[in-house]
Amino acid sequence: MKKSKLAVLGLTAALMVGTFAGCSSGGTASGKKVTIDIYQFKVETKNALDKAIAQYEKENPNVTITEQTVGGGGDYAGTLKTKFSSGQEPAIYNIFGQTDTHTWKDKDTDLSNEPWVSQAVSGTLGGATLDGKVYGMPFDLEGYGLLYNKTVFQKAGIDASKLTTMSAIDQAYATLDSQKSKLGLTAVTAWAAKETWVTANHGMNPFIAPEFKDDESAYNSKTLAFNYNDGFKKYVDLNIKYSYKPNGSASSINSIDYTTQVEQLFALGKVAVIQQGNWIVPTVKGIDPDLAKNIGIIPIPVESSAGTITGKVPVGVAAYWAINKDKDADTVAACKKFLNWLYQSDEGKKMIVTNFGFIPPFKNYSDSLVSNLDPLSQDIEKYASAGNTISWVFNDYPSGYTDKVGADISKYIAGQLSWDQFVTNTKNNWSSLHQ
């Protein structure tokens, strides 16, 4: 997503009130009974999706929708490929940015003429557009950074608005560390290093995104300069220093998965800060509704010899809904109508905001509806509206790159790889996987 375009991903563009025609109910053009099988990655909103499906089936008795979710600690991309290769092809599935759009271009339905395309917030279709054709419907807008427990910070006397540098964050973490007993903390933070998308994608993204102007340039680049790598080292070292260590050793950080980080530690008040995004709110709300209303975000500072970037939050599209063009015509038509209903009907819009908790990627959502978003999502939207954003380029990585970088970060955490060697590997893997 272009950084210049991200400047308009805010209240003015995203909340324009509009109307939508052509979002009729009904499953197929012929009225035949069809079954839509959905294979999706977002574990945080599985329950909301199931409720939406139940409502749609009630209104459209000729349509049956099955849903399978593989995400969090699961290998969605790998299992999706397995499904296609085994002949169990889903009708609706998720693609992620330019790399996936190229990978699945022979399977994806061209959605360019769908009515929601004209309502998409500027910049949100870039990851799923190839040769001028749109192959995916944007899920939502999301942002991530250092999420913190406002109540804990207040008790510790820490003003999060002043944490604009890595050294300031280090000092704040030291304060929290010294007050762990009083604050009921097991550790200051928890880094889900077992999840390569947490470390290699979200963690590294702020330190390489400045090299590229948009999705296409990132995807097409055959080299990675990695000029901000010294800034990334500061960030990784900070996580190693203050992260929850299950057995006391740095290497045990590599055993922390998403569930442990979010549900067992942050949501239960055992750690004060985690690197995550607004997608965790539904999960936290299910465990501690009060905490869900009191989560703040600290932008990850980029402090490097190549330059300094502060006060910016990575904002982008989590994924895209794609439709399998090899399904029969009735099924493809039913898939299009379901997605249109979910994101563009009055009933669906309400679900997207209140049940899913999504920042809408479309312009025709009313101000009054979007005001129901959780406080964290509203904060992220403010960063977007002010243009204080960093683009997401991890969805444009060469295929297989995330796993290689994630494995090397784990080795560095465990003391099995020097930083210089990590930098060399990171640059070389980008080039070699681009062949």
Image: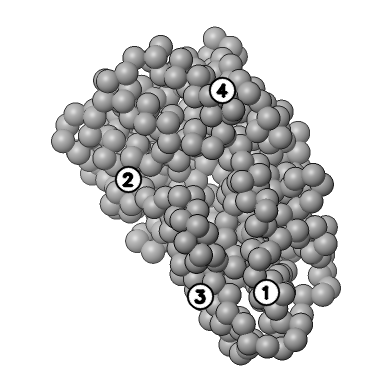
Which residue is farthest top? 305
Decide which of tag 4 and tag 2 comes sooner along the chain: 2
Q: Nearer the viewer, mark 4 or mark 2?
A: 4
Instruction: Give the residue displayed 68% in from the left and 82% down from the top.
Output: 27
Residue 165 at least partly seen = no
Residue 257 tag number? 2
Q: Nearer the viewer, residue 339 or 81?
A: 81
Q: Nearer the viewer, mark 2 or mark 3?
A: 3
Where's residue 222, x and y in %?
A: 63, 23
**Residue topped by disc 3:** 66
Instruction: Give the residue displayed 57% in from the left and 56% down from the top.
Output: 94
Decide which of tag 4 and tag 1 comes sooner along the chain: 1
On the rendered structure, is 401 left or right of 20? left
Decide which of tag 3 and tag 4 comes sooner along the chain: 3
Residue 431 tag number? 4
Disc 4 marks a residue whose amino acid type is Ser
Instruction: Give the residue displayed 52% in from the left and 59% down from the top.
Output: 84
Instruction: Give the residue displayed 58% in from the left and 79% down from the top.
Output: 35
Disc 2 marks a residue whose amino acid type is Asp
Mark 4 and mark 2: Cα distance apart in space: 29 Å
Secondary structure of the residue carrying numbered label 1: loop
**Residue topped by disc 1:** 328
Is disc 3 surrounded by few (<14), some (14 to 19) or many (20+) residues within 10 Å?
A: some
Secondary structure of the residue carrying numbered label 2: loop
Q: Is residue 373 above or below residue 152?
A: below
Q: Quadrant of residue 349?
A: bottom right
Q: Is residue 408 above or below residue 254?
A: above
Location of the C terminus by quadrant is top right
Mark 2 and mark 3: Cα distance apart in space: 27 Å
